[in-house]
Image: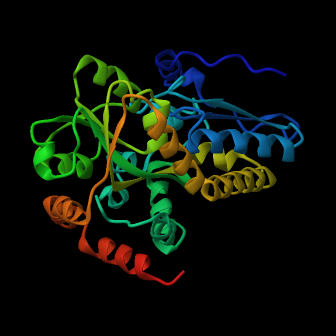
Amino acid sequence: MRSPPPLPRRHALALLALPWCAAPRAQAPASPVLVRFSHVVAPDTPKGRMALRFKALAEARSRGRVLVQIYPDSQLYGDDDEMEALQLGAVELLAPSLSKFGNVGVPAFEVFDLPFLFDDLAQVRRVTQGPIGQELLLRLDRQQMVGLGYLDNGFKHMSAGRPLRTPADFRGLRLRVQASRVLSGQMRALGAQPVVLPFGETQRALAAGVVQGAENPLSNFLTQGLAPLQRDLTLTRHGYLGYAVVTSQRFWRRLAAPDRELLAGALADAIDESHRQAEDTERQALETLRQLPGVRLHSVDAPQRAALRAAVQPVYDDFERRVGADLLRAVERAKAQTP
């Protein structure tokens, strides 16, 4: 049985807010379980591929009783309204970047935005897959969300119309960032002007000159078509970009226990596959970029990296004042653990 197409986002949210459009009661056991998974990136990215793999696993293991509909590229909801859509029941699954959770009342997630905090994905996973990561997911309960897992999209690099190797190179540039106090502070510390924009608007903003550069993992830089607009890509590897896969408490609690177990298992396996492919994904993206005409890749040497790291120290000081030093110390201890 095919479900009707979703309403456009503004109409859907307006209708769901009305009392006569309240969510239905729990479905009978024989009814299909519909999972609408909305995200803002292209299908051919780590998150996009993970979502498709989750769909395949969930539908196969349930023998078709679970129906997963994937809406990539902000087709259904974008950065500005996806959280509201989840809370109102317009979608069942999201995978927002960790940056977004600071603005919904869990500022501890901003620790993942700190520049130059992680050296590699192994360090990241010692945090996300350990007690710190699990405790942060539990904090989402206060926002009526259930945190189901973390997903990597690798490390970010800087693009603009010139190389960005030193703090002086950043001065005066308008650079697109996510809505994160840490990321805005990072750009100001480097002498640039942060411009907060939804991810789906980045390409248009660059084309129109609203912003002059951005930070992205290599896969996002490629799939969003930024190469024709940003001829210089500096491999700064300065910050981590990851996601938390979340659902609403209302949806999750209405599911029968076997369905919750099936969906959680399919998601965990899809994330594991994505993580195993992470290094290959970045390597392939880098090779593609090296062959693209008009794109110039720039490296950052050790002294330049040290200068950039020193310039953003005020961001760490502000984080400790607002969120507390204990979390940062705990992250440092987790990073140092032997695998």
Asked if residue 188 lies left or right of residue 331, the reply is left
Q: Is residue 171 visible?
A: yes
Provide residue 199's location: percent of width, then percent of height. Answer: 39, 32
How many circles with numbers are drawn on the protein?
0
Asked if residue 112 lies left or right of residue 33, the reply is left
Judge by depth and name the residue closer to the eye, 278 or 299: 299
Q: Which residue is pictured at 16% across the width and 52% down the height?
A: 166
Provide residue 322's location: percent of width, then percent of height. Answer: 20, 61
Asked if residue 151 lies left or right of residue 337, the reply is right
Q: Which residue is pictured at 50% across the width and 60% down the height?
A: 137
Asked if residue 96 lies left or right of residue 169, the reply is right
Location of the C terminus by quadrant is bottom right
- As displayed, is residue 41 above or below residue 303? above
- As displayed, is residue 327 above or below residue 178? below
Location of the N terminus by quadrant is top right
Q: Is residue 148 visible?
A: no
Quick one: which residue is furthest to the bottom in this view? 338
Q: Quadrant of residue 150?
A: bottom right
